[in-house]
Amino acid sequence: MFGRMKTLTSLLPWIGATALAVVGATALRADEGMWLYSAPPRDALKAKYGFTVTDAWLEHLMKSSVRFNSGGSGSFVSGDGLVITNHHVGADDLQKLSDEKHNYLRDGFSAATLAEEKRCVDLELNVLQSIEDVTLRVNAAVPAGATADEAVVARRRITAEIEQESLTKTGLRSDVVTLYQGGAYHLYRFKKYTDIRLVFAPEQSIAFFGGDPDNFEYPRYDLDVCFFRVYEAGRPVRPAHFLKWSAEGAKDGELAFVSGHPGSTRRLLTIPELTYIRDNQLPYNLELLKRREVLLSNWSARDAENARRAREELFGIQNSRKAYDGSIAALQDPEFFGAKVATEESFKKQLADRADGREALAAFRRIAEAQATVTKIVGRHRMIEGRVGFNCDSFGLARHLLRAGDERPKPNGARLREYGDARRESFEQQLFSDKPIYSDLEILTLADSLGMLVEKLGADDPVVRLVLAGKSPRTRAADLINTTQVRDVAFRRKLYEGGSAAVAAAKDPLIEVARAIDAEARALRKIVESVDETKQQAQAIIGKARFAVEGTGNYPDATFTLRLSYGAVKGYEENGRQIPAITTFAGLYERSAKQENKDPFELPARWLQKKATLNLATPFNFVSTADIIGGNSGSPTVNRAGEFIGIIFDGNLQSLSADFGYEDRQSRALSVHSAGILEALRKIYVVDALADELVAGKRP
Amino acid sequence: MFGRMKTLTSLLPWIGATALAVVGATALRADEGMWLYSAPPRDALKAKYGFTVTDAWLEHLMKSSVRFNSGGSGSFVSGDGLVITNHHVGADDLQKLSDEKHNYLRDGFSAATLAEEKRCVDLELNVLQSIEDVTLRVNAAVPAGATADEAVVARRRITAEIEQESLTKTGLRSDVVTLYQGGAYHLYRFKKYTDIRLVFAPEQSIAFFGGDPDNFEYPRYDLDVCFFRVYEAGRPVRPAHFLKWSAEGAKDGELAFVSGHPGSTRRLLTIPELTYIRDNQLPYNLELLKRREVLLSNWSARDAENARRAREELFGIQNSRKAYDGSIAALQDPEFFGAKVATEESFKKQLADRADGREALAAFRRIAEAQATVTKIVGRHRMIEGRVGFNCDSFGLARHLLRAGDERPKPNGARLREYGDARRESFEQQLFSDKPIYSDLEILTLADSLGMLVEKLGADDPVVRLVLAGKSPRTRAADLINTTQVRDVAFRRKLYEGGSAAVAAAKDPLIEVARAIDAEARALRKIVESVDETKQQAQAIIGKARFAVEGTGNYPDATFTLRLSYGAVKGYEENGRQIPAITTFAGLYERSAKQENKDPFELPARWLQKKATLNLATPFNFVSTADIIGGNSGSPTVNRAGEFIGIIFDGNLQSLSADFGYEDRQSRALSVHSAGILEALRKIYVVDALADELVAGKRP
């Protein structure tokens, strides 16, 4: 599921690129694009599907779409404020509503009456009401000849002014969003809702049927849905727009639209950056993840308590590993990568023909040089500054104590950013957290990562010799973890308050290891940060040149703003087999039976009991060629008439290429089918009031 | 368990070194050594343990020791021909005796009477009777000035002559064995037994309690035993020597001896070779194994049938991965590796002082140069000639068809060795085997390995471009596996019989891939083979020089000949915790309960039912510092009095260093305790006749 793709970002930082500009028009393929509602692909839809986008159609879809600020999408599906999203988008809220007696996340929930609907703890929903281009006003506020820093300050001031002015005038939440990597600034106004109540959720075992093994796979059989109701002044809202529910739902071959909030894409990285990701970063990430997966799986198999301790990290590792496997598969595809190369070359040719193109071409060269610099030192950087050679919570704490002591006396602006005043509160919360740290698990992971340090830097490397101090990785790891005091919160508090003198006086063995490598760690970090800065500046120049060439005739990289995607409901070929577009309830039962109904293929009891009542030919999940990515979870899939025919909940493995570009041969967006949802609600859960409300568009 | 360490040798060949010479005397540590019975460590035992080795004591132990020619050890434990070995040594025979109705391997076996004892299908046992030094006679048969080839022929002739002469004279199986890497030749005479009958075996779930998770771990709780009886002329033999059973068994701290057949060690590799293994070969092997483990685990989790298809390979991968993790841990230990360096330096100094040392020192330099040559090309060699980039059975068949067509017309001596006449029968049996090959699994592994090919050689490498043909690894793998005909036995037969013309005419896509890379593959192989030859010649020179310096005052590398090891029954410290030397039945039940009695920690029903009858304080397994390795499985552990106090069945993770050298801080040999065996036989299995025979040394 998409939401989980983020798990390891702190562990495995992507390169610092923040390429937010339009994709090259020449590379645009069929059904590609995460389009702005202010610039929909009218021509392409007309040409390929004979579909005319009207303003009314667009407004209806936009105002029916809901943003979950916790990181997903959803939509209004009744005139009485009913909102549908994914079970895994609502999971956070289900968890927060649960207590010792009620595990709604695992067991599901159903409110028979309005009174039984449960108010969520801190959920906020936003519905986009209007888009206004404020680019001229923002740019006008930045004086000609301003330095980069001055420009940032000026832009921040005018942005705040526009937002405040709009809020006062309309009462709507008003955000100025940056698009096209600074090529455009738009004012987005939202209706904001904070009284959100839980109406219905199925069991997690059917919402995430197939678990990690089937994650990112297809065919699938997941009832990944969850219903909430939006209230205002204690009563269900009556939204001006909501999606009519299609009882028939998605049909093979038909045109489908997806309206939601893709989180982020990096489709405009330069070829040297992509080459680096393909040949260096992803192989390294995958080697590391597989190494850790084997380490933790093996340790978990030895002991049930081990398994409990490692479960969450192991799940995150497996999810990320699968996602990266998908990314590298895309970049290793000569056709996919070749298209990226062709697009860049074509754009560079256009630049060469323009008077203002010289600066952008120079920026391309600077990025290539910067990338070469990173490639040279990234191996050491990962191990030493990136802490991959010191993989345990204790070392993280040890380094923070050391560095906080050294950094805090400096002026705020001169510190490493994590020790800045702005982050102080959350930093201290983290540093003094008393979450359990298990010394056996710490020894296990530190020993393994010290072994990796030896492998990657060589046994005779000075850092390796310094760190091991003549011991084997296993012995040294045990010694360090067993003698350091950093797992004691009081000790951390004392050293943090005492500053660098107290830290030095403690002579804690693990902190002393952090100290021994700190000079080189900082030096490596400095190189990477300077390269990132160079790249960002160069990318901004290229982004502006691209915007000058293409304008808003194309779509910007994803930024968690509302976008319109489209495509056909359509199967695909894989390993010589044809994968049908639509699965059925019959397929669900077959899959479960073949896996002997064992976890994670175990069906909830009522699904087994009520099987006979179901029409097993009812569609359950389906795929389409729409261009989506993480953040689109919960997006409504609609037909030409703007009716709800399904809900996005995942992409297949091949769709993991979407970060870097679009392809439609095998890459597919996965939806739960509207007819399947209805069948399950009526026959399995027997919540006819809810089903009737969906069909009628209002409460019965 | 030791036997399993061999599983992946064909997949991951070690370097070609066959260093069989004595270890440097200066590096000899406490309790080190796999000693020849003809040159036991009398002085060390006297000095450290005050123990005097008498000839009678030695002869008794030697003639009580049994070699299982299937690859393990054992011992006589009664005057009526009863032999004990490990369950996992007897597993092959249990399997062969099983049929559709009786799964003796899984469920165990017990014969109440002699008549019920089951004759094994093809088991041969050997008992060493005498050792004679024939070095002078062998060397005298090789004419001065003979070339290497001539020397081989002459040595083969005299060896056969000595063996035949001895057989005629004594009627005993007579083998001339090479020791000290050619420094000595000994004539070993064995009594040979071929009528071996199964007496008793427990359930596999208690013999291998803890399964793969606990493999190579300690504390352990395994009843890894199996009893056979040796017959001659239809009656139990009455061996002149057997071990008296100690009902009390091993005691913490006491001196213990191990008498068995260590398979092979590589303690005399040069430092450049060891450095290569530590920094290049083992990290690569481990990366590959972990990659495949994750691939197959994930695929297995998706489908029960997938799991069945991948099970055997996955188990082999996990076992090898654990073994290699242990090996690299040893080599990454600066103390362990430093001792190896010191030993070599000291030996080189001795050589420098000798007139005949110059040639050996030059041989050291040649090995270093040869190793550097390998290191440069081994990455490409593994991928292209080693087939790591083409991991599937179909590619193996495709290459064999191609190469057999090219090689068979050549004179026998000019062919690649696997196509030689001597191997022809087994080659054809393999080539035309109709064992099932699953195309989905083939696509999975080929796609993954093509991805690895891209990673390791780079996307722009000519071989990569040629192989992928513009497709992604996944698409290309599916295309190749779905269109090749090599999985059809009739097709293979046709091409093999038709020779290279038929192979070319078939234009099979996978064979054409093999052809496209064949020139480079062969060139890489040629380099590696030439380096191996250089190294072997140099190692022989060094081995002879070492023998000239040290003589038989030390022990030779292991060669599956009978050896005597010794050490103390002694716990160790791990991660700051003290691991006791001896475990008990109480510990077994605790471990099982903590794992909720789930596979592989599930106890057989009778172990649960009869728990109350047991004395839970009875010792079950124990560890000692004796120097052992694979092949020692089933070796008796005996006390000063030569009584049976336990039986070797495994080493701990740290003992996986034994291939390269001995250490006694954490490395331990694992035995089943003689008292524990007796308790289980009496209380759980209620086979008092067998227990009484052990205690009395004869049938009741």
Image (spheres, coloured by chain):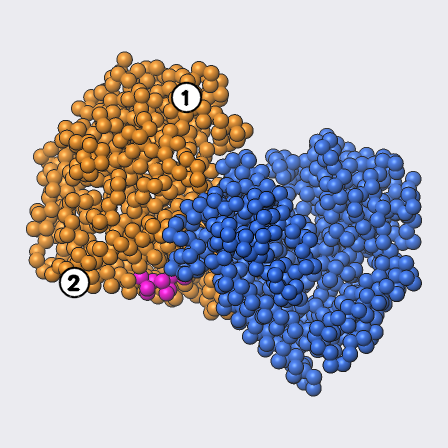
Chain colours: A blue, B orange
Q: Quadrant of residue B522?
A: bottom left
Horizontally, residue B573 falls left or right of residue A85, namely left
Q: Disc 1 marks which amino acid?
A: Ala
Residue that extends furthest to the bottom in the rendered view of this protein: A355
- Front residue of A52/A319: it is A319
Q: Position of residue A19 (x, y in %)?
A: 67, 68
As displayed, is residue A488 above or below residue A638?
A: above
Q: Residues within 10 Å of mark 1 (few under 14, many from 20)?
A: few
In this rendering, does residue B425 appear at all?
Answer: no
Q: Please tell me which residue is depicted at 23% across the width and 60% down the height of the picture.
A: B364
Magenta: predominant secondary structure element? helix
Left or right, B161 with reference to B389: left
Q: What chain does mark 1 sit on?
A: B
Report x, y in % for residue A296: 52, 44
Report the residue at 78% width, 52% height from top: A68
Assign the N terminus of chain B to one quadrant of the image.
Answer: top left
Residue B267 is covered by the magenta coloring: no
Counting from the top left corner in percent of width and height, residue B252 is at 33, 28
**Mark 1 / mark 2, whichever is N-terminal:** 2
Q: Is residue A625 above or below residue A357?
A: above
Residue at left offset 14%, top offset 60%: B353
Q: Is residue B651 left or right of residue B535?
A: right
Residue furthest top in the image: B700
Magenta range = B371-379
Nearest the eye: A443 or B394: A443
Q: Quadrant of the C terminus of chain B?
A: top left
Which residue, given by chain and number where applicable, does mark 1 sit on?
Answer: B617
Q: Which mark is residue B358?
A: 2
For numbered disc 1, what is the local secondary structure?
A: loop
